[in-house]
Structure formats: C-alpha cells, structure tokens
C-alpha cells in the first residue's frame, strides 16, 4: 500500500482536513459575494413593483403645513387629499431632510417644478420642521405645497417603503404611477413622463 492511500476503515490524512478547513472562509466569501451581486442586479426590479394603490384614489388625508416654511415670501400651503383632485396632474414626492437619496434627487425636482404639464407637491416624512426648512433653504423649494407627516401615518396609508418615493396623480385624484428611490433622467423618461402624458390625456377626454 502506497504512502498516499488511506487504510481501509482508517481516517483521511490530516493534511487533507487542514486544507479543507482552510478553504471554508474562501467558500463562505464566495457565497456571500454571489448573494450580494444577485441583490444588486435585481435592486432596480424591486423599485418597479407596482403599488396596490395604482389605479385607485389617493388615500384620504389632511396634513398640516411645515411650520415656518415659506416660498417667495409667502407661507407654503399644507396638503390634503382634496388638493389632489381637480387641479390637473400632480407629482407627489415623499422626502425628508435626513434622507441622503433625497438630496441626490433634489436638482431633478427643481427642474421638474418648471414643467407646465404638472405641479410638484411634497410630503415631508418623519422630519423636524427646522430641518425641513433648512434642507429646502439650502437646495431650493420645488414644492407648491408641503404636508408634514411627522408621525408617518399618512406614509403608511400611501404604502411608503422608504424615502424618497414619487407618485403621479391625475386630475381625478387617482394614482397612476409610483417609483421608489431617487428620481433620475432614465426614470423620468421611461416612467414618470409617460405616466404624466397618459394622465393628461385622460383628463382631456374627460373634459
């Protein structure tokens, strides 16, 4: 019997066991890397999951204004579900001063506020008034109205997963589009703007 053979009924050489044990961390790292890459690849798909509220009226709500928030020298109005019907197409953005992606997408919102096809309003989510004022004071205010959802209750009714989230609401107060995550040029061109056009078309037919 050669030196490399294992005797019948005997144990494997100790060298082989040591090599296998040494490989365990590498195998675990490889498995974790595969899981991470899979989640990264499919992260965008989770944002495209349609909300249960798509095609349904906005939840009934009434939110106070953000205390002390002004725009062009005038107080920024509060927000309620009644404000989202009969005022054309509205883009509703759920945001917070503590939200890093909200800061990332804010220049996009500022540009969107110039678009005559819709108005932009905000739901300030679980935030402090002074922080919300500072955030918009530093970056600009794209919102025609802002409701302060300090306890997050209205966000729950809207099915908010996290911030930022953005909705398109048609003239009848029906939710036509939802996106989870910071808005980008791609999201606008492939999702939000087509939803706005559809909503505007539906309003035209109703007229």
Image (tube, rainbow, N blue to C red):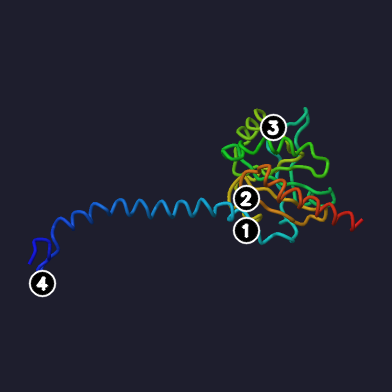
- Answer above or below: position of 184 versus 58: above
| Label 3 Cα neighbours within 10 Å, binned few <14 / some 14-19 / many ≥20 | few
Q: Residue under label 1, please give it.
A: 49
Discs 2/4, front: 4
Camera-side residue of 200 and 88: 200
The furthest residue to the right: 207
How far apart are the two marked residues, 1 and 3, measured between alpha carbons? 36 Å
Discs 1/3, front: 1
| Label 2 Cα neighbours within 10 Å, binned few <14 / some 14-19 / many ≥20 | many
Rendering coords of residue 195 (x, y %): 76, 52
Residues under numbered marks 2 and 1 in contact, where contact means CB atoms less than 8 Å apart: yes
Quarter of the image where the N terminus is located: bottom left
Residues under numbered marks 4 and 3 in contact, where contact means CB atoms less than 8 Å apart: no
Residue sitting at x 74%, y 45% = 79
Q: Residue under label 3, please give it.
A: 68
Mark 1 or mark 4, earlier in chain: 4
Q: Say left or right for 41 vs 106.
A: left
Q: Residue under label 2, please give it.
A: 180
Mark 4 or mark 3, earlier in chain: 4
Rendering coords of residue 60 (x, y %): 73, 56
Q: Say left or right for 185 vs 22.
A: right
Q: Residue under label 4, please give it.
A: 8
């Amino acid at each position: 019997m050669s030196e490399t053979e294992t005797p019948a009924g005997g144990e494997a050489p100790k060298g082989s066991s040591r090599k296998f044990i040494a490989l365990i961390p590498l195998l675990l790292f490889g498995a974790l890397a595969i899981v991470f890459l899979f989640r990264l690849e499919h992260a965008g798909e989770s944002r495209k999951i349609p909300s249960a509220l798509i095609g349904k009226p906005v939840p009934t709500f009434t939110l106070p204004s953000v205390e002390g928030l002004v725009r062009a020298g005038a107080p920024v109005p509060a927000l309620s579900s009644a404000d989202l019907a009969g005022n054309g197409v509205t883009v509703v953005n759920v945001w917070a001063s503590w939200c890093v992606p909200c800061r990332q997408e804010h220049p996009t919102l500022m540009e969107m506020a110039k678009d005559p096809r819709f108005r932009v309003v905000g739901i300030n989510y679980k935030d402090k008034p002074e922080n919300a004022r500072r955030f918009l004071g530093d970056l600009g205010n794209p919102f025609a109205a802002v409701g302060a959802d300090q306890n997050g209750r209205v966000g729950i009714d809207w099915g908010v997963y996290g911030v930022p989230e953005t909705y398109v609401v048609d003239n009848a107060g029906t939710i036509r589009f939802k996106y989870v995550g910071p808005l980008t040029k791609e999201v606008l061109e492939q999702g939000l703007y087509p939803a706005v056009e559809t909503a505007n078309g539906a309003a035209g037919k109703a007229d």
